């Protein structure tokens, strides 16, 4: 039995559409829309990367090929960190990571996008307002 998330999406606006309209000419042919951090850079919106070293996880995660940078990326959550976290909650074993460090890292990564998303929304939907 799943949870119905449709009510949560009422009024949802995907920023990839206005982003592609505004910056589509900057994208390589093989991309449909810009990466979040790239879009923020183009729009002058500050983002704060989440670094593994801030959570003492840089050496713990070295054996995972999907983790290919010093800071967290969405694909890292989907390919490694999300599973480690869920497994850790379920069994208490997160492998090489502390569940507390992993939870703090994922929380920082997720909440770090909220303010920039609202700023992008404001820029795309109210461009006449001063920045």
Image (tube, rainbow, N blue to C red):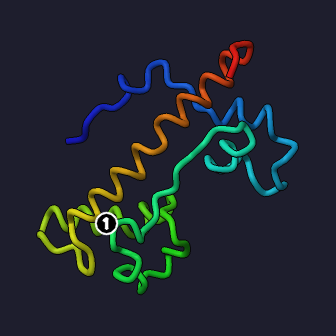
Query: Does 44 sit left or right of 65 as displayed?
Result: right
The residue wearing badge 1 is 83
In which image quadrant can residue 123 be found?
top right
Residue, x 49% and y 81% (percent of image)? 65
Q: How many marks?
A: 1
Q: Nearer the viewer, residue 80 or 109?
A: 109
Query: Does 70 sit left or right of 61 as displayed?
Result: right
Image quarter where the C terminus lies is top right
- In the rendered image, residue 6, in percent from the top left (x then y), is placed at 38, 27
Residue, x 35% and y 74% (percent of image)? 57
Query: Does 118 sit left or right of 19 as displayed?
Result: left
- In the rendered image, residue 32, in percent from the top left (x then y), is placed at 73, 47
- Single out the residue that lies furthest toward the bottom: 63
Q: Nearer the viewer, residue 55 or 98?
A: 55
In which image quadrant can residue 55 be found?
bottom left
Image quarter where the N terminus lies is top left
- In the rendered image, residue 33, in percent from the top left (x then y), is placed at 71, 45
Label 1: element kind: helix
- In the rendered image, residue 120, in percent from the top left (x then y), is placed at 62, 31
Q: Is residue 127 above or below residue 100?
A: above
Residue, x 43% and y 61% (percent of image)? 78
């Amino acid at each position: 039995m799943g949870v119905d998330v449709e009510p949560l999406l009422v009024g949802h606006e995907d920023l990839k559409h206005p982003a592609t309209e505004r910056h589509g000419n900057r994208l390589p042919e093989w991309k449909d829309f810009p990466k979040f951090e790239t879009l923020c850079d183009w729009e002058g919106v500050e983002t704060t990367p989440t670094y593994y070293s801030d959570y003492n996880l840089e050496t713990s995660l070295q054996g995972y090929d999907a983790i290919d940078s010093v800071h967290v990326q969405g694909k890292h959550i989907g390919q490694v960190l999300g599973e480690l976290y869920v497994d850790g909650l379920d069994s208490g074993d997160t492998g090489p990571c502390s569940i507390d460090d992993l939870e703090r890292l994922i929380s920082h990564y997720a909440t770090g996008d909220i303010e920039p998303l609202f700023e992008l929304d404001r820029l795309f939907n109210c461009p006449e307002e001063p920045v």
